[in-house]
Image (cartoon, grey):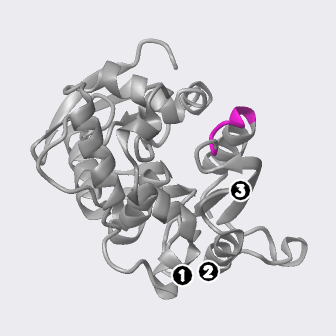
Amino acid sequence: MTNAPQTGYASVNGLEMYYEIHGTGGTPLLLLHGGLFDIEQQFGEVLPALAENRQVIAADFQGHGRTNDIDRPLGTVDLASDARGLLAHLGVEKVDVFGFSVGAAVALYLTIRNPELIRKAIISSVSFHPDGDRAESSEAVGEMKVEMIAGTPMEAAYLAKSPHPDLEHLQALLTKLGGYDIGGDGWSDDDIRGIEAPTLITVGDCDAVKLEHAVRFLQLRGGDVNGDFVGVPSSQLAVFPGSTHFTGMARTNLVSDVVVTFLDAPMP
């Protein structure tokens, strides 16, 4: 983690939403973690590089990390509302966004529905339509029990950080994740084509998202062209080798280089 971040809680939609601010300068970068993770577990290894020359705002979602849970299902629309509320609380009008998995679903929602908020978007390890998901991944998430993660870093982090650190609340979180509401039937091809922000799509080569779906995502964003003749599109795709959904951020140097290079590139 970077040194001495500013930390706090924002009262948003009934939550006391925990956030951290690292670094200074440039367009702020909003980090949105995946399900069952938190700021440190998801982004801790890449945060120093990300915050070296820019301000980074990171948040724990509902029921994750240091943010409390409330009597509300987990879903993209509500989590996006929470993210907008946090930015309003901080007085931030425009950001780059980097979301992973559930966080990427939220980042994609914000990029499409709130284009005025987003300069550049990094969408990692999530499909834009359910037909891009591998079937076994959805089945596994829907059946998660606390016994399945006993003794893991995820269980330890939850019990150490949560405002309600017990297995009953952890099971409630797993159940909510199993019933996660993506907010409809996914995005249409026209929705993806219409995104205004330059988009970096990242996926592991052994991810929960099918590789052909990631390529389709890129094509809809104007990629998969002969850049030597027509130029390199502002939207790009990175496939991380030897990476699964849960290890998608493990290639720290590779992830940092790809993300920072994309963010630092001039706007088209």
Write down the residue under mark 2. Answer: 220
Amino acid type indicated by mark 1: Arg
Q: Is residue 16 left or right of residue 5?
A: left
* The residue stretch that appears in magenta: 248-253
130 lies left or right of 209: left
According to the image, label 1 marks what residue?
A: 193
Q: Secondary structure at mark 2?
A: helix
Quadrant, the C terminus? bottom right
Mark 1 residue crowding within 10 angstroms, few (<14) / some (14–19) / many (20+): some
Q: Nearer the viewer, residue 160 or 231?
A: 160
Q: Which residue is label 3 attached to?
A: 206
Tell me the kind of residue under disc 3: Cys
Circle 1: element type: helix
Prevailing secondary structure of the magenta residues: loop
| Camera-nearest residue between 46 and 181 | 181
Residue 145: give x, y in percent of width and height: 37, 45
Query: Counting residues from the N terminus, which is met first, the one under dot 2 or under dot 1?
Result: 1
Q: Mark 2 or 3 closer to N-term? A: 3
First along the sequence among labels 3 and 1: 1
Is residue 69 magenta-colored?
Answer: no
